[in-house]
Image (cartoon, rainbow, N blue to C red):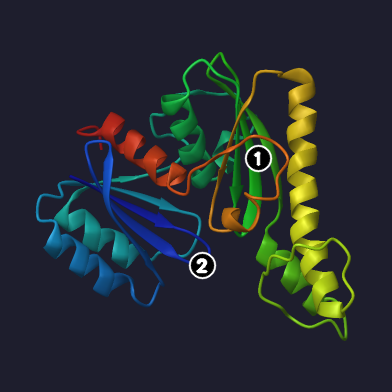
Amino acid sequence: MNLIIDIGNTLIKLAVFENNSLISKVNSTQKEFENNFQKITEEYEDISDVIISSVGNFSEKEILFIQKKYQTIILTHQTKIPFINKYKTPETLGVDRIALVSSAAIQYSKENILVIDVGSCITYDFLNSKNEYLGGSISPGIDLRYQALHNYTDKLPLLRPKILKEYLGNTTKSSIHIGVIQGVVNEIDGFITTYKLKYKELIIILTGGGAHYLVDSLKNDIFANSNFLLEGLNYILQNNKNKC
């Protein structure tokens, strides 16, 4: 069994895979991590290998603790991956994006793939039918947009994301909700349209914690998969076992 530890900017995800099947997933705060890690490793005693992917804070002490118990891979740009990386600064490419593109390379071989991850940031990553990763783009995530409106103005309130069916806000709160959510929808549809001008055959994957706010509003055909990044990390771990 494999244990996937994905450290994001707000949450840590722990996922257990048996071969390529996800059998358990836990979302944890940094404070709850040790307790949740203990529970999941006690429940699944057959765990033998771990991969750690971190774009957030994770201490050296925690990493050493895991390494003492399990054969562990720390994902970096130097880890063996299932695609050709043509990013000009591979050392700056986020490990979350590496995992997402790895998932695309394994699950959609010989296809043009655009992976859109809606998290703290919204990332767009493109893998062509030659298995070449060409790059993408990064924009502020949904929560960041709400926070920016509040933090950089004197009177706008800080709101939690909310889906409204109307397109015309008649209060300040509804105007913010529509501006943020519909703004992201329009952005994503716009990016997809731009890619499709060059790549008519294009598979679009939507993932990330904020994807559920958008999936029903996007005009384009998409595949929604909330576990796409975890699956990519598991593929990388499977491909690198006994090489760490």
- Give me the disc on residue 124: 1
- Give me the disc on residue 10: 2
Instruction: Looking at the picture, tell me which residue is in the foreground, 2 or 66.
Output: 2
Instruction: Looking at the picture, tell me which residue is in the foreground, 157 or 102.
Output: 157
Q: Residue at x 38, y 29 (%)?
A: 80
Relative horizontal placement of residue 215, taking residue 40 as reference (left or right): right
Helix, strand or loop at label 1? It is strand
Is 1 drawn above or below residue 44 in the view shown?
Answer: above
The picture quadrant where one finds residue 182 is bottom right
Work out which residue is located at the far left of the displayed protein and give it. 45
Q: Amino acid at mark 2?
A: Thr
The picture quadrant where one finds residue 93 is top right
Relative horizontal placement of residue 81, taking residue 65 as reference (left or right): right
Helix, strand or loop at label 2? It is loop
Work out which residue is located at the far bottom of the displayed protein and give it. 155
Instruction: Looking at the picture, tell me which residue is in the foreground, 15 or 37.
Output: 15
Q: Amino acid at mark 1?
A: Tyr
